[in-house]
Amino acid sequence: MEQFLIDNADRYEELVQAFNHKPAAPVKAGSTNPDFLVSTRIRPLLPDEISQGFPEGVFSRPGGANIVDLHELKKSVRGLPCLNQSFSYPVDRVFGPDSTTKQIYDAIIQPLVPWAWGGGVSTMFAYGQTGSGKTFTVSGLEEHVAETLMDGTLEGERKLYMSVIELAGQTAFDLLNSRKQISILEDSQGNTQLAGAQEHPLTSKADLLSLISTASSLRKTAPTLKNDSSSRSHAICRIRIENRSIPAAEDGLLYLIDLAGSEAARDKSAHDAARMREAREINTSLSVLKDCIRGRAMVDLDPGSGKKVHVPFRQSTLTKTLKHVFDPSPVGGLRGGKTVVVACVNPCLADTQASRNTLRYAELLRVTAGRAGKKVQEYDEKRPVTWGNGEVREWVGKNSGTPPVDGNVLAPTESGAQLLRLPVGEFVERCLKTPGVTKEQATAFQSKFWQLHVDNLRSQSSSQHSKEKPEVKLTRMERLYSSADIEGPPHARDVPFKERIRPGMVVSYRSVGKTGGAQMGTEQMGVVLSRADAVGERVRDLTGVQVNHGGENLGERYLCAMVVPAILPGAYDVGLWMQVVVGVGEMEAEVVLEWDVATRYYYLTV
């Protein structure tokens, strides 16, 4: 068959030139997920393929249509050979043989880095037939990622850690620790842990590239008819980005994944039973990966529908390791994610069958609004997923506390659904760009925004069997779960807090001569208990000093219980026995704490 293709290469090229392609269908705005891209890279013909006389069988359609065309040649019973079949595969981006790795990085991979830097999850998958340039592409992209992480252009300071593991079948190995076997386990919180894998701190581009080189040298390879060192396992490079300045923010994760190379049927003729079993395991993991990617993409396209989508991430070690990439639950959705798939294609006419499989796989990964069954959702002030950009900015201005967060800075273009996917660290850092906004206010506002979304999902779930959704009204006791004043003036926040000090109010104060407590910058927090002159003469404060000593201006001093940090990040507790005397002049601002029944801790709110 290969000799037939070589002998009729000129005839094939004439048929391709004369082929009349159907015009590409226009892409509707909002029909694709901007946080999930499927791209194709068509490598150039190799020198040995050119020397043998093979023509190209895979083409990128001109005109920026982002369509890959594939044509096959067949023998005719009578007459000259003709085109057997022609296929067209739409993707989000097509990179032809003349495209460089730098161009691919700038176009689709570079946005993954700042997203992970801000606390999100970014993932790049490289997939393709063995010998299609997959590992070459990943290696080049890793160099550009290292340069972006270390060139100082990203805002803020971060701690970077790197681990590289290999998945061969159901077994995992640490490539940065002499291929020692590790375990993929779930902890009590349902999070996947790489038990036994070592993390290496990164301080420079050279460190990162040196670790990648070490891992590549230990990766499992085997010769095939198409590649003398074909990758026979999945390699997962994970870069964890720690933001210590925002404790409430989870670590950002950047995954660079080189999937095992697939093979054409003719490459398997000389395989033994072990190699055939290995191929089946690779195909199974890739099939599960496809189902997980599609499932998560369908949820992201229609986040407010409440429709349950099964994402089978536990059916494969690969997808189990990447659970937080695919988890569609509200908690998993809190980790905003961006995913890019690079399908590497061999254009040689002799390999069109394998190229068809690769392109078909890439096509199945794309989920458009039509496939997801997306419907236009009417605006609902209690459902952030239905908000447009205008509604988001209006809500931010009214509900972000004092001073109000600038909605144009927090959400310059984002809708409500897009703002929900913003990582916590990025959300907080955008809020801090508004003058006067503190880190505590920004963190509390982010929690309030997400709580509104979670409460809406819960109300939807509880109302599925009811035709009419009951209006929820909080009782007086439920309103008292917050330290906000519910008995004061109608617009209490417009009245200076020093004019309405009351028992139960939480205030921040300067920590002059006082110890312990939960610090807010250079301040601490305390719950007002009573006026200092209202207690008995035997009452002592935290340091043992008498509170009511009969001096002057005791009415301007208050006995307060200190607010202390709890075990959970961002949580607080009240130390009723840790009492301090705070003067009105030392008080800086009112702070609103909200009691959470589930964790039995207090949290900042606005």
Image (spheres, rainbow, N blue to C red):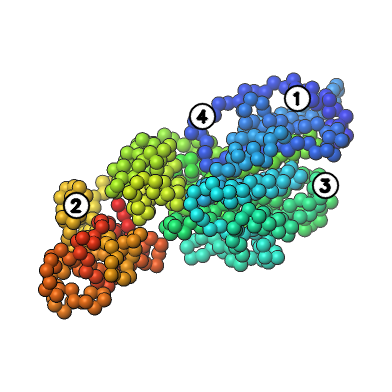
Apparent side of residue 111 relative to residue 555 in the rendered image (left or right): right
First along the sequence among labels 1 and 3: 1
Tag nearer the camera, 4 or 2: 2
- Tell which circle, 3 or 2, labels the residue nearer the N-terminal end: 3
Q: Nearer the viewer, residue 96 or 110?
A: 110
Quadrant (top left, top right, bottom left, bottom right) of the N terminus = top right
Judged by depth in the image, the label closer to the viewer, 1 or 2, is 2
- The answer to whether 546 appears left or right of 49 in the picture is left
C-alpha separation, residue under disc 4 versus residue under disc 2: 52 Å
Which residue corresponds to mark 3? Answer: 225
Asked if marks 3 and 2 touch (Cβ < 8 Å), the reply is no
Cα–Cα span, label 3 and label 2: 79 Å
Distance from disc 1 to disc 2, alpha carbons, whole Å, reads 78 Å
Q: Which image quarter: residue 499? A: bottom left
| Residue 119 rendering spot, x and y as whole percentages | 49, 52
Number of the label disc, if any, that sits on residue 28: 4
Question: In terms of sequence position, does the residue under pointer 1 or pointer 2 come before the other?
Answer: 1
Examine the rendered structure and indicate whether residue 65 appears above or below residue 131.
above
Which tag, 4 or 3, sits closer to the chain's start?
4
Dot 3 falls on a residue whose secondary structure is loop
The spot of residue 90 in percent (x, y) is 62, 33
Q: Amino acid at mark 3?
A: Leu
